[in-house]
Amino acid sequence: FLAASQHKSPILSCSRAGIVLVSSRLGSQTVAYEEGRRLMYDYCSSKTALNMSAILLARELKESGIYVTALHPGWARTDMGTDTAPISKEESIGGSLKALGDAGEESHGKILTFEGNILPY
């Protein structure tokens, strides 16, 4: 269905198919190592695996023009994020939608943040 809906628009839109995998900055091996946060093996490992899926899918689907990214939506105040998180759900959603709307080929197969930045693997 994604391939059938594809119109190869240069930006992610209703005219360009895309796959967005919800990840976390803690899935970045570089960030997890450098920040020295408490060890959350299960969470970090699962997000790192998800990021690898984004890399492999991006490579596999590149010729079809289907955009693939792993998105870090930010640490938001939710049941999981708790009240100590620095951003609201609305900031997370708004930022994520803007980042995806502005995304170009440079973020294909990368970890994109809700702020529009690309994280290292």
Image (spheres, rainbow, N blue to C red):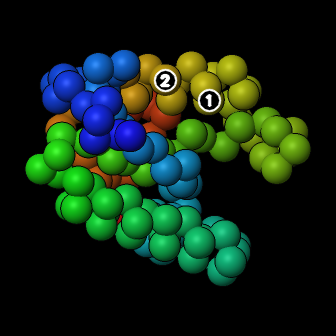
For disc 1, the marked residue is 92
Q: In front: 98, or 119?
A: 98
Residue most extreme to the left: 63
Q: Could you tell me the amino acid type at mark 1?
A: Ser
Q: Position of residue 15 (x, y in %)?
A: 29, 20
> Vertical placement of 104 versus 42: above or below?
above
Left or right placement of residue 26 versus residue 81 in this view: left
* Dot 2: element: helix
Q: Could you tell me the amino acid type at mark 2?
A: Leu
Which numbered disc, 1 or 2, marks the residue closer to the eye? Answer: 2
* Dot 1: element: helix
For disc 2, the marked residue is 97
In the rendered image, the quadrant that contains the N terminus is: top left
> Vertical placement of 109 versus 52: above or below?
above
Residue 3 seen: yes
For the residues bearing labels 1 and 2, Cβ distance under 8 angstroms: no
Residue plotted at (21% across, 61% down)? 59
Residue 34 seen: no
Q: CA distance from mark 1 to mark 2?
A: 9 Å
Residue plotted at (79% across, 36% down)? 77
Which picture quadrant has residue 73?
A: top right
Which picture quadrant has residue 89?
A: top right
In the rendered image, the quadrant that contains the C terminus is: bottom left
Q: In front: 35, or 8?
A: 8
Left or right placement of residue 87 versus residue 84 in this view: left
**Tag shown at residue 84:** none
